[in-house]
Image (cartoon, rainbow, N blue to C red):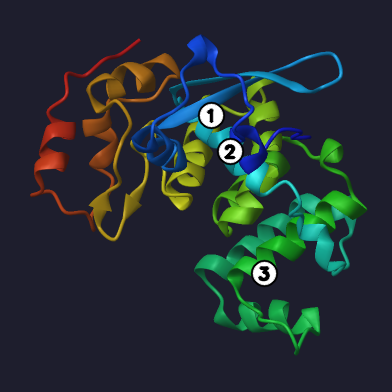
Amino acid sequence: MKFEKQGKELFKESAIWYNETRPTPEEMQQFKKGELYCDVFVDKANMVQLLKMRPASYHDNIIEILRRNVDFSPSNDNVYFDINCDSLATQFEELNLYRTKSKLLVRQIRDSLLLDSLERNDFYFNRVLLASVEKKCGFESLDIKGIKRVWSIAHHSEKETLACYFSYIEKQTIAGILHPEYLALATDRLLMYNDYKQVYGSQISNSELYSIRNVDSLNIRRAEIGLEPISDYLKGFELINTTSDFFQKVISLEPVRY
């Protein structure tokens, strides 16, 4: 993804604003928080001709996150696992054990990196694994299980890696390969990681339900992509503060089922 227009250059004194109304200092603060967004209109030479400030959507927030991370790629480290593409599905299943069952396997996997000078943690492991599969096998070779595994690894990675593979998750969802739930979870987590409000109510932070954009219409948004009402979804979480006013408001929302 290529981003041409960004930075303070948009807000120079000579900029032309819609209705000749420059943003106030308060609006600029809202812009910095992601509450407002600036549409940029350019001519055929890609020169800025007009700016227009408006309320930001979560799509705008996602675009801004991807813009900030456009230069990041897990392959930048030039470190890769020795992946056998012919048995990739089996390797994915074996590697998944390291998260849940085998501390020994964790050490074996990390030691196989031979990266004593680098921090060897779960996030770095995920980053190397995704870069290895993409470079050596290509994501186009993955079956549905492999695609879901890529989603899972990216979803449980640091925010830069999730941002890097967000467009891939989005494309797989649009193509009908992944259920919209996968994109919804990735969307909420990416927004939360970058201090924006979530959209579908899927994320918990420090035992608290993370803040939600336009909470009153939450169940409508969830139903539109085939998700159960939020009150049903939250029953699956044990370590969550159920006494807060915000939580009580959310679970009292009228259920919507399509």
Q: Distance between the residues labelled 3 and 2?
A: 24 Å
Q: Which amino acid does label 1 sit on?
A: Asp
**Which corner quadrant holds the C terminus?**
top left
Q: Position of residue 223 (x, y in %)?
A: 36, 17
Q: Name the residue under label 3.
A: 124
Q: What residue type is labelled 3?
A: Tyr
Q: Residue furthest bottom?
A: 116
Quarter of the image for residue 24 reads top left
Q: What residue type is labelled 2?
A: Glu
Q: Position of residue 209 (x, y in %)?
A: 26, 47
Quarter of the image for residue 248 reads top left
C-beta proximity under 8 Å, tags 1 and 3: no
Residue count near mark 3 (Cα–Cα under 10 Å), binned few <14, some 14–19, many ≥20: some
Residue count near mark 1 (Cα–Cα under 10 Å), binned few <14, some 14–19, many ≥20: some
Q: Between residues 42 and 183, which one lies in front from this camera angle?
A: 42
Q: Mark 2 points at which residue?
A: 64
Q: Where is residue 25 in the image (x, y as percent from the top left)?
A: 38, 38
Q: Distance between the residues labelled 2 and 1?
A: 6 Å
Q: Mark 1 points at which residue?
A: 60
Describe the element under mark 2 as helix, strand or loop.
Answer: helix
**Which corner quadrant holds the N terminus?**
top right
Tell me what residue is drawn at x 61 percent, y 76 percent.
121
Tell me what residue is drawn at x 61 percent, y 49 percent.
162
Q: How far apart are marks 1 and 3 (CA)?
A: 28 Å
Q: Between residues 12 and 69, which one lies in front from this camera angle?
A: 12
